[in-house]
Image (cartoon, rainbow, N blue to C red):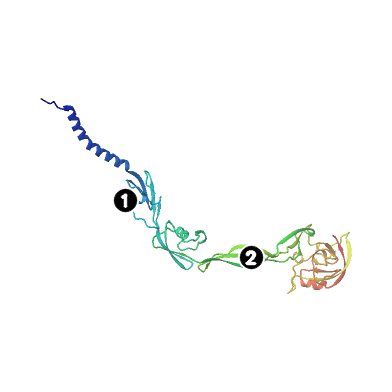
Amino acid sequence: MRVGPTRSADSHRAQHLIAALVPALIITLSITGFVWAQKEVTVVVDGRTSRVRTQAASVEALLDEMGIDVDADDLVTPALDTPLGDCTSVVVRRSIPVTVNLDGRRVDIDVVGDTVADALVAVGADPASNSQVIPPPETPLRAGMTVSVPHVFVRVSSQEVTVAAPVRYEKDPSLPRGVRRVVASGEAGRKLLVYRVLVAGGAESVPELANSRTIRRAVPRIVAVGTGSRVRHDASSRSASAKPPREGRRMRVETTAYSPRQPDLDFTTATGARARYGIIAVDPRTIPLGTRVYVPGYGYALAADTGGAIKGNRIDLCFETVREAIRWGRRSVTIIVLD
């Protein structure tokens, strides 16, 4: 008996085609899976940026793959055990070994930062209050550098000073214009000044005024300034033959004479007016300062000075020369008070 074939020729050809396609499919899937597993990552090490493709599962595995060594004091962001994803950014900031001399003790420290100020913060010092640090806080850090922080403290000092008496001017219409008279001499005051001095490494800063307190207030010096009419001392008023006024209050007085040219005498008048002919010294309780008077044999005069020996009904006449003063001598006359 003859037996026919169990499969057709088409079936055999299909089997051969499948056998040829399977290895190619396996290779394609392997390549595609490798590409899918890769991630694009940005790595920044001390400011230098790199972009890499990797299959590393974590930040630590990535750095090992790139051959980047990390010490315990270095700063890595994100942490080493963080899973790595696509588009992840990894930042590595290496620590810088420096020595800080702080208040006489040495501190060796690895600092993650850019300037000396970062080193001060790392050892617990305030950069803002350590202006005397060497080198200055804004200096860039470099490996192996030494930072010196001098011992800093504040010293307080005080000083008593004299405060000059202020001058207060008051208008006085009873005095001729331009004439000044000291009404009150005033008194200087005292003030306590408190200073703050910053001492760093034995060097002192410029004292800074921290506070002040008044111990005794200054008493003003009061000067009366004449605002009345001016008195002219022309030739007629200096003449002994000047005509007396028709009106005025008559008063019997004892007169003496002086001259500003007498040696060893100070003829600065009490009102500040210059001692000259026509100026007389009076007792202000009898004849007020600034009063115009007529003196027979002398002429018109202005009461603008006082004197320790001038009391009551006594006046002192000013002459230009010593000879004129001696010639006058001492006389009793009846004067006419005009104001």
Q: Farthest residue in the front direction?
A: 1
Q: In the rendered image, which residue does mark 2 sit on?
A: 193
Do the CB atoms of the residues marked 1 and 2 lie less than 8 Å apart? Answer: no
Mark 2 surroundings within 10 Å by alpha-carbon count, few (fewer than 14), some (14 through 19), many (20 or more): some
Where, by quadrant of the figure, is residue 295 drawn?
bottom right
SS class, disc 2: strand
User: Which residue is more in the foreground, 128 or 228?
Assistant: 128
Q: Is residue 74 left or right of residue 22?
A: right
Q: Amino acid at mark 2?
A: Leu
Horizontal side, residue 301 vs residue 112: left or right: right
Which is in the foreground here, disc 1 or disc 2? Answer: 1
Residue topped by disc 1: 65
- Tell me what residue is drawn at x 89 percent, y 65 percent: 251
Q: Position of residue 293 (x, y in %)?
A: 84, 63
In the rendered structure, which amino acid carries the disc numbered 1?
A: Glu
Q: Position of residue 226 (x, y in %)?
A: 77, 59
Q: Quadrant of the C terminus?
A: bottom right
Identify the image quadrant of the N terminus: top left
Numbered disc 1: secondary structure: helix
The answer to which of marks 1 and 2 sits earlier in the sequence is 1
Q: Residue at image x 27%, y 38%?
A: 29
Find residue 269 and name its label: none
Q: Residue at x 32, y 40 (%)?
A: 36
- Taking depth in this image into account, of 15 and 282 the one nearest to the observer is 15
Residue 177 seen by the camera: no
